[in-house]
Image (cartoon, grey):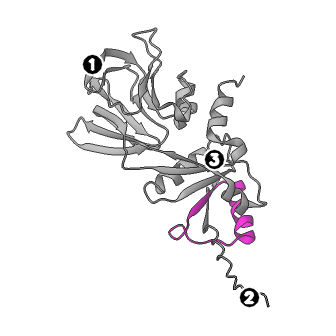
């Protein structure tokens, strides 16, 4: 007689729990209604993956909401540009999420000392930008790791961009597009009058950038970390916050590295 061998199949792994969130745009709301009928969903608090429906502004909001909680974001474009989003397709969504490539991003922490003596902070996934508040140009001193590199820049502003943000406002200000794995930040002037030919710098991602606002009361400046604005700043320090991270998921055939590479050859 042959032996009887008991076979106990390994239990199948449960699929990731998905939550859907959407902007107020009609296209996003229509997609939300369709997807929540097609797929099982849960609350954001209980989810492993959040599917964000909207544009780049909306997914930035969703990424900020998920900072540090370990939830990954899979965006589908129901807005305009959608650089951080995947193409919208309601079919086979669970499989797309399972096959997706994860990009982990470390945000920038902006620390502002205001004219009134108050200190305020905010986080940025794309960029921190300093902008003049009035008709008068700003005057800004720039220090890198506490070493003065620019005694005075007369300008509309200046920004520090992450690789993810290098294709956004930074690109509009003629800053460089930075690959995700380059390990650098882009420091880019905004309409600089003096020094007129300075086009910015690439900095190690570990760098601490300090901006001193010269004549801060006469030439007021605001500081913006993604969507958070702090007005009337006297000094702004920007550096990576290694204690925070956020995960974003991309279809493997159109990952972030590919998007950034294609953007450099866009006409």
Per the model, the C-alpha gap separating discs 3 and 2 is: 59 Å
The tag earlier along the polypeptide, 3 or 1, is: 3
Residue matched to label 1? 148
Q: Is residue 119 visible?
A: yes
| Residue 185 screen position, x and y as percent | 45, 30
**Number of numbered callouts drawn:** 3
Q: Residues within 10 Å of mark 2 (few under 14, many from 20)?
A: few
Residue matched to label 2? 4
Residue matched to label 3? 55
Per the model, the C-alpha gap separating discs 2 and 1 is: 78 Å
Q: Is residue 26 visible?
A: no
The residue positioned 29% from the left and 44% from the top of the image is 120
The residue positioned 62% from the left and 32% from the top of the image is 260
Q: Residues within 10 Å of mark 3 (few under 14, many from 20)?
A: many
The answer to if 31 sits in the magenta stretch is: yes
The residue positioned 65% from the left and 46% from the top of the image is 85
In the depicted structure, whether residue 31 falls above or below residue 155 = below
Secondary structure under tag 1 reads: strand
| Closer to the camera in the image, 26 or 19 | 19
Question: What's drawn in magenta, residue-wise?
Answer: 24-51
Q: Are marks 3 and 1 in contact (CB under 8 Å)?
A: no
């Amino acid at each position: 007689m042959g032996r009887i061998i008991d076979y106990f199949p390994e239990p199948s792994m449960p699929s990731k729990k998905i939550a859907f969130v959407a902007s107020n745009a009609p296209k996003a709301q229509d997609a939300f209604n369709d997807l929540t009928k097609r797929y099982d969903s849960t609350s954001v608090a209980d989810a492993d993956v959040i599917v964000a429906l909207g544009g780049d502004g909306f997914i930035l909001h969703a990424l900020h909401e998920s900072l540090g909680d370990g939830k990954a974001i899979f965006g589908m474009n129901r807005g305009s540009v959608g650089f951080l989003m995947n193409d919208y397709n309601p079919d086979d969504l669970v499989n797309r999420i399972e096959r997706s490539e994860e990009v982990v991003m470390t945000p920038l922490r902006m620390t502002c000392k205001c004219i009134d003596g108050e200190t305020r902070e905010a986080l940025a996934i794309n960029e921190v930008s300093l902008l003049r508040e009035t008709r008068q140009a700003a005057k800004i001193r720039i220090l890198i790791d506490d070493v003065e590199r620019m005694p005075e820049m007369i300008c509309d502003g200046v920004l520090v961009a992450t690789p993810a943000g290098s294709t956004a406002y930074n690109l509009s200000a003629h800053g460089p597009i930075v690959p995700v794995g380059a390990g650098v930040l882009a420091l880019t002037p905004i309409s600089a009058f003096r020094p007129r030919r300075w086009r910015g710098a690439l900095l190690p991602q570990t760098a601490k950038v300090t901006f001193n606002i010269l004549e801060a009361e006469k030439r007021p400046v605001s500081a913006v970390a993604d969507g958070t604005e702090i007005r009337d700043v006297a000094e702004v320090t920007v550096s990576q916050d290694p204690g925070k991270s956020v995960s974003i998921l991309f279809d493997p055939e159109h990952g972030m590295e590919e998007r950034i590479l294609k953007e450099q050859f866009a006409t």
